[in-house]
Image: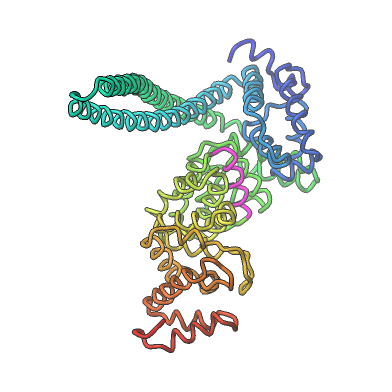
Amino acid sequence: MTDIARGRGRTGDVELGAVPEVAALGNTLTDLFKGLGVTQAAYAARIHVDKSAVSRYLAGRRVPPQAFVDQLFTEITRHRGVSVQEHVKEAVRQQRLDALRVTNPDAYELDSLRAELDRSNRETYRTGLLIESLTDALEKKQREADGLAGDLAQLQIDWAAERKEASGRHVRLREEQETAATARNRLLRQIGELRSQLAEALAQRDRAEEQSEELRAQVLNLEEELARQQGDAAPDLPSLEEFQELVGKLRRAGDHAAAVRELVTAAHARPLADVLVLLDRLPADAAVQLVADVARMRPIPDVLAVGAHPGVAVSAKNQTGLVEALAARLSPQAMAQASGAWATIPDNRSALADRTLAAAVLRTESLEEARAALAPLAQTHQGVLTPRLTGRALAEKYGKGAFLETFLMVLELRWTDLVFRVSDNDDVPFGAHAPPRFLPGLLDLEPEVQTAVVRAMAAHVSMQAAGQFAQELYGRPGDRWRWAGRELLKAFLEAGEATGEGFSARLHNWIPVGDLRDDIARWRAAAPADRP
């Protein structure tokens, strides 16, 4: 640590608001916080942080973790309905780094590397978009050039065949040929330029990916180094028994803010083995706080180890605190990887993994991004992870506006349990007529895709979801796709009967009294060869 850092960043100076960089950051955060229209105490309860910590962050008497800043951006976006502009986020991140530089050089170096890694990842993403755009443009220009080459060849044939005709005709054909040749040459030059730009973009992407890998390795090395330093400092901490007694005294005295500060310190500074022991010894609400703090501040391997602890695996509150804190710092893909790690926990293994995967889905920005997060687990964890909350999250995030597309995505993953969960998360009362979820989009698909959807609905969904599907296929008077839907209904009933589980009889019993129920009864009564 430099002498400047020692002189300007002492803990006492920071607590007194005497470090300009920290004070400036506090003023910025306070200005942003005012837009939420809530008290500091209410906000602290909302994000599961001690209110005294929120007060210090906003007063410029402590440098907040990046997770706190990111969470503030998220809450402002939810409140206003408009995202915080990227240049504002970048300015606040830089202010935080400036504050860290004079208060905690080690943390400053680590966070600077993380910020540089994020920028490198964004550059890789933008370059990928540019490559896609250039590839599309190149293919379009190539098709145009090929078309002009054909036109030019035809003109040459016409010219050769009619060169003995009038000179006017001869001149016109020659002019047309020259015009086509000029246009083709221009297109070929444009194609050459696009190829050059594409090659440069590919090289730029490779450089960005290489830089990201180097930065990622530096971040991991620095995290390990800081973890070793924390381990070396562990003997200066009070014993576990002393710590437990101290927290108990503070709680009994009603000084909950001080107790929370001690828990935050333990989550950050104590060896992982101590944290795991404390999870067994602390009262339930204190353990929830400790788990959330670990998820916010510790290296990811430590967080995974805490999630695997029996006290977390069987506690919904511990799981919620863990997942919410982790979601503030990880991408959806990284959250899905954590879910995969937790899916193998022997006791109640599926609950935490499912909760984490659901949080990953809710953080995605598109159905394609959700598919990318789900695909690896669909291949490796079927039968191990029960996606109850994940199915609900998918239905909530994408099902209401694009149910058919969501269903097809899950069907493509071949995750049958997720097919069941997505289709069963429907807030439409049974028997009620609702806007179509499948039709008419289903009728626009290829016949083999229609067949796959019908078979999946017959084999992998609840009877209530099957009943809603049958009602939609049956339609109502005036529906323009009614007759096409009824053809699919026949295929649906046949696919259900093929399961060998009395499908049509159970469906008949579920359907309310009416025309659809009567038609199913007639279909069942007919011999297979005579069924309408």
Q: Quadrant of residue 97?
A: top right
Q: Nearer the viewer, residue 512 or 6?
A: 512
Q: Quadrant of residue 479?
A: bottom right
Q: Is residue 338 left or right of residue 108?
A: left
Where 502 falls versus 107 (above or below)? below
Magenta stretch, main secondary structure, is helix
Residue shown at 61%/51% (left/top)? 320
Q: Position of residue 495 (x, y in %)?
A: 39, 73
Image quarter where the C terminus lies is bottom left
Q: Is residue 26 left or right of residue 461?
A: right
Residue shown at 59%/19% (left/top)? 105
Q: Magenta stretch: residue 62 in it?
A: no
Where 104 falls versus 329 (above or below)? above
Q: How is the image coloured?
A: rainbow
Q: Nearer the viewer, residue 313 or 507?
A: 507
Q: Position of residue 138 (x, y in %)?
A: 36, 29
Q: Is residue 56 visible?
A: yes
Q: Magenta stretch: residue 318 in it?
A: yes
Residue shown at 25%/22% (left/top)? 170
Q: Give the residues in magenta.
A: 317-330
Where 270 falls versus 178 (above or below)? below
Q: Nearer the viewer, residue 281 or 260?
A: 260
